[in-house]
Image: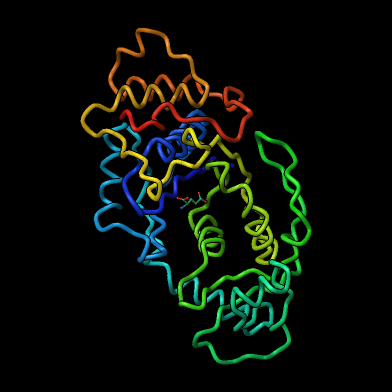
Amino acid sequence: MKYIGRFAPSPSGPLHFGSLIAALGSYFQAKSRQGIWRVRMEDLDPPREMPGAADTILRQLEAYALYWDGEVMYQSQRHNAYQAQIQQWLDDKVAYYCRCTRKQIKAAGGYYPGTCRDASITEADGSAVRIKMTHATYQFKDEKHGTIVIPSALAEEDFIIKRRDGLFAYNLAVVLDDIEQGITQVVRGADLIEPTGRQLSLYHQLNVTPVSYLHLPLAVDKQGYKLSKQNHATAIDLQHPTPTLIRAMEFLGFTLPDDIRGGNTEEIIDWGCRNWSQDLLPFATEITSPFSNGAL
Ligand code: GLU
């Protein structure tokens, strides 16, 4: 089977050192296997997006010689597919409307206790949609970290597939899109280990063979927080990409020879594809970024 990987940024801001790690890790994993590397814009949550960020991200990928295969998929253009699946599950009584508030769920112990499961709420307005969890995933295999165990209360929760504000849930969109794009392996940051069980449950609900998963170490700042737009991670440099590219590859475990360090982005990326192995990756799930002090 042909390897098909992907990079799926949310356009809440330009790429920073942390998102570059996910882009590079997924790219090397795909290209070292003569595979395909797709890009998907996860523009699912307009209030959290920054105008122009999607285009900036594509320009940044090009500046780092990370060229994608095929058309970029935009989640904002996939609403019909998400809604059709939700409607089918509602019709099949596999999903249901729920009006519980966060406060009520917190008072019930933090995990949703299935209050509206059999309440037959038909009104969609102001209600979330939850999936009836009949395919709970208690553990899964990560290609780097081995068996990941999921606490049963989390695994068994009827989670939200459409939010009460009408936005589609990330877990639903990511699974339907990975299926649509023919993805065979998901390579992404270790911050997404936790929702992986839910995504696997959706594959089982859909009766589709799941992707395999490889979670990369997460770049964190000196306080241990994930580098993100919210905590002002600096955008990666468009004009002088090579120093950042080299740092990011070192973060992934490469030791670059001097003649390669002096090359341009194409030469460095090409060398990376020829020399990549997932065994290079450090086992830690969190590593302090060399740029966490805002030096670049
Ligand atoms: N859009 C998600 C993010 O930027 C990544 C989703 C995924 O790789 O599954 O954090």
Q: In screen coordinates, is 230 left or right of 122?
A: left
Q: Nearer the viewer, residue 232 or 65?
A: 232
Which quadrant of the view contains residue 88?
bottom right
Residue 145 picture location, percent across and down: 68, 35
Q: Is residue 282 above or below residue 225?
A: above
Residue 43 picture location, percent across and down: 38, 60
Q: In screen coordinates, is 153 left or right of 194?
A: right
Residue 31 picture location, percent across and down: 46, 32
Q: In screen coordinates, is 55 left or right of 160?
A: left
Query: Which quadrant holds the C terminus?
Result: top left
Q: Nearer the viewer, residue 219 or 257?
A: 219
Q: In screen coordinates, is 265 left or right of 122?
A: left
Which quadrant of the view contains residue 80?
bottom left
Q: Is residue 9 above or below residue 80?
A: above
Q: How many marks?
A: 0
Q: Residue at x 48, y 14 (%)?
A: 255
Q: Residue at x 72, y 73 (%)?
A: 108
Q: Nearer the viewer, residue 37 or 34?
A: 37
Query: Which quadrant holds the N terminus?
Result: top right
Q: Residue at x 43, y 71 (%)?
A: 79
Q: Nearer the viewer, residue 240 or 100?
A: 100
Residue lying at the far top in this picture: please name it: 258
- Look at the image and name its color scheme: rainbow
Which quadrant of the view contains residue 15?
top left
Q: Residue at x 56, y 76 (%)?
A: 86
